[in-house]
Every structure is written in structure tokens, then in C-alpha cells.
Image: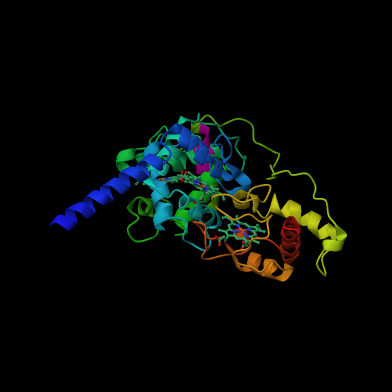
Amino acid sequence: MRPIFSRLFIGAALLALAACGAPTPGIARGEAMFDTCAPCHGDAGQGKVELEAPPLAGASEWYLAAQLNSFQGGARGYHYQDAGGLRMRPMSRALTTPEDEQSVIAYITSLPAVDPAPTGRGDAQAGAQEYQVCSACHGLDGSGNQALNAPSLLHLPDWYIAASVQKFRDRVRGATPGDIAGATMFPMVMSLSDESIENVAAYIQTLGGGGGTPTTTTTTTTATQPPMEIDPALLPAGVTEAMVQEGQSVFAGAGICYTCHTAEGVGGPLAPNLTDDVWLNVDGSYSSIVELINTGVAQPREHPGAMLPRAGMPLTDDQVAAVAAYVYMLSR
Ligand code: HEC
Ligand code: HEC
Ligand code: HEC
């Protein structure tokens, strides 16, 4: 009996110690953690269309927790056609403790909802008809029904509503065994055409007060950094200054490298520093960097979530060669 008791005691003491050392859970902790989410979901939680990342501001606590659990457990963001979900899944793994998850949720729910501008793609009037079915669970006013696991659809942009409904219809979301909430959606949307989906999405967006004038400008992601100073003597064979310059804009834009490696490339909780001479998965040569970007890192050595091949983005071979050139020069 005795040894067991003392071991229990030591265990309890260690736990208490760990709790002391850990940062206090709460909104302040959540705000700091949200720095990891902001590159994709926006500083104000308003979402970013170019990364397919929806707004989080305005979502309810129970729904945020349920979705983070779905991503963590692999019920969401599992399908090879689900670029957005695949992008999000490793992020959910950055929240390693229930306290961290509660803290970031507490922070997100403190953010005021932002009503997005409609894309103007669908016909809201036609969509009102389609919405009859949806209202059974999501409510006539779109505010959701927790008892049915049906989230509020208010303050969501039409592009995200349409993309999500298509995913449910095409079994790209909500089709894993055990995903009871996700499975609810399939029969409701299985027979909808793409056009009906655009229409119902346009209608839903008018419910959230986002029925203003359509946006015509497309935003591009950039994490602007001053242009890199290039010493031509350091360029590897076959690499030009122009490639490095193009690579810098891929890194901060289409390649979404900055979302994990940070705009400066110095790394953070999701990805390693690329500006020093410490390498985890490559030998630092130009060709090894090109190869790594093409294959991604399925099993990171020191980070919680995978890097997808070409970061999950539709990059051309030239763009990969260019961004590799930029990464190569970052560490020189
Ligand atoms: C690399 C970009 C990226 C980062 C960083 C990121 N997310 Fe996401 N997140 C996404 C994308 C893309 C989606 C949409 C997935 C889909 O369409 O199914 C998403 C979806 C979500 C959803 C589901 C929203 C809904 O309405 O169903 C939640 C919740 C979420 N993210 C929370 C977070 C939190 C919390 C963090 C920070 C710890 C975070 N995300 C970091 C890209 C990101
Ligand atoms: C029988 C109840 C039910 C009906 C009817 C229904 N839904 Fe849902 N809906 C749900 C549930 C449950 C979820 C949450 C799924 C999950 O957890 O992944 C959901 C999720 C969604 C989402 C994802 C929201 C987000 O933030 O990612 C959208 C968009 C959506 N529904 C739109 C619709 C539309 C449009 C219709 C009508 C054509 C509809 N739903 C009909 C139950 C329903
Ligand atoms: C979803 C987050 C994420 C994105 C986006 C991302 N990376 Fe990574 N990257 C990682 C992780 C995780 C690793 C592996 C770290 C480990 O092994 O612990 C990694 C490793 C690397 C390495 C090897 C570093 C080493 O020390 O071995 C390079 C080079 C690299 N990434 C470049 C890029 C480039 C270029 C892009 C954009 C095209 C990019 N990454 C986008 C997460 C990401």
C-alpha cells in the first residue's frame, strides 16, 4: 500500500507544480494564443477569404469547442480535397491543453462580430425559398439551435457558407464515422445544385446584416517585409536575384509560408526558424530545400502539426524554385 500512496502523492505534487508553472488560463492567455490564429483568421477574427479561413468572431462557445475537437480528432479536415480543412487541422493541434483551448475560445467570444461584405455571386431572393428547410435546425433568423448541434449562420460570409455546404454535400466534411453533428447536414443538402447553394448562401448572409453592396476588390494576402538585400556571390547555381525576389512574395503571399514560419521567417509555435543555420529536416543545400517544399513534412520533429506538400497551395514548379531560393538566402 505504502509505495502506491507515496507515488500518488508525488504524482499529485508534480501536477500541482506543473499547474503553478503554467500560464493562467483566461482571456489574456487566449489573446496571446490568438497570435497563432490571426495570420489566417484575421487580427479581429474577421476571416480571410484568400486563405478560405472563416470569421471566428460571432461564433458561439459551444460550437467553437466542438469544431476544434473535430479537427483535433480528425473528424474534420481529413479529406484530400479539403484544402481549407487540411490547413486548419494542424492548427487545432497547437492547442495542446484543455486550458489553452478554453482560453483561446474565451478570447474569440469576446471579439465583436464583423459583418462581411457579400461576394454578390448568389441570388438572395431565390435562396429564401431554399432556406425553408435549413430553418428547421438553424432557425428562421439563422441564430442556430444548440440542442440540435446546429450553429448560428449569422455573420458568416456567403463564400464560406457555400463552400461548407458543398463540402457536406460532397462528403468532404461530416462523413467520418461517429461525426453525428456533421452527418446531420448531408441529407439536408445532398440534392442541392451549386447554383441553389450560392443562392441560399446569399440569402443567409442577408440575415446577418451583411446585405450591403457587393465587394468588387479582391484582397491579396501579404505579410510585407522590406525587400531582401541580395549578395549575388552567395546565390547557389541556377538561382537568380529575380528568383529570390519572386520567392519573397510567394513566401508572404500565395505560398502562405508566413502563416506558420512568421513574416520574418523566424518561426514560432507552428514551424521552425528558417533564418539560422540550424536545420531539422534538410541539410541546408538549395536542392534539399526545394525537395522539402515539394514533399512537406508529414511528421515534424519538434512541432505539433504537419507541413503539407507545397504548403497545401497550388504552387507552380517555378514558384517552388523561387520560394526555395528565398529560404536559402534567408539563412545566409
Ligand atoms: C494556416 C491558416 C489557419 C490558422 C493559422 C488557423 N486556422 Fe482555423 N481555419 C482555417 C481554415 C482554412 C478553416 C476553414 C476550414 C473549412 O473550410 O472546413 C478554419 C476553420 C476554423 C474553425 C471552424 C469555424 C467554423 O465556422 O466552422 C475554427 C473554430 C478555427 N478555425 C479556429 C482556429 C483557432 C482557434 C486557431 C488558432 C489556434 C486557428 N483556427 C488557426 C485556417 C487556419
Ligand atoms: C437537421 C438539422 C439541419 C438542417 C435542416 C440543416 N443543417 Fe446545417 N448544420 C447542422 C448541424 C448539426 C451542423 C454542424 C455540423 C458540424 O458540427 O460539423 C450544421 C452546419 C452547417 C454549416 C457550417 C457552419 C460553419 O460555421 O462551418 C452551414 C454553412 C450550414 N449548416 C448550412 C445549412 C444550410 C444552407 C441548410 C439548408 C439547405 C442547412 N444547413 C440545413 C444541422 C442542420
Ligand atoms: C502549417 C504550417 C506550415 C506552413 C504553412 C509552412 N510550413 Fe514549412 N515547416 C512546418 C513544419 C511543422 C516544419 C517541420 C518542423 C519540424 O520538423 O519540427 C517545416 C519545415 C520547413 C523547412 C525545413 C526546416 C528545417 O529546419 O528542417 C523548410 C525549408 C520550410 N518548412 C519551408 C516552408 C516554405 C517555403 C513554406 C511555404 C511554401 C512553408 N514552409 C509553409 C510548417 C509549415
Residue 274 found in image quarter: bottom right
**Residue 205 in magenta stretch:** yes
Report the front residue among 193 and 115. 115
Which residues are the magenta region?
200-206
The x, y position of residue 265, in whole percent, is 67, 51
Report the front residue among 8 and 78. 8
Q: Is 72 placed above or below 200 here?
A: below
Question: Left or right: 277 with respect to 140?
Answer: right
**Residue lying at the far left of the rendered structure:** 1
Q: Residue drawn 82% across and 70% down?
A: 237
The x, y position of residue 50, in whole percent, is 63, 47
Predominant secondary structure, magenta span:
helix
Q: Quadrant of the C terminus?
A: bottom right
Q: Specify whether residue 110 is in view.
A: yes
Report the front residue among 307 and 210. 307
**Residue 157 in magenta stretch:** no
Q: Residue drawn 54% across and 54% down?
A: 87
Report the number of numbered marks. 0
Residue 104 found in image quarter: top left
Display colour scheme: rainbow
Q: Is 268 placed above or below 234 here?
A: above
Report the front residue among 261 and 201. 261
Q: Specify whether residue 134 is in view.
A: no
Q: Quadrant of the N terminus?
A: bottom left
Q: Residue drawn 14% across and 55% down?
A: 2
Residue 35 found in image quarter: top right
The x, y position of residue 13, in whole percent, is 28, 46
The x, y position of residue 213, in whole percent, is 64, 31
Question: Left or right: 173 with respect to 326?
Answer: left
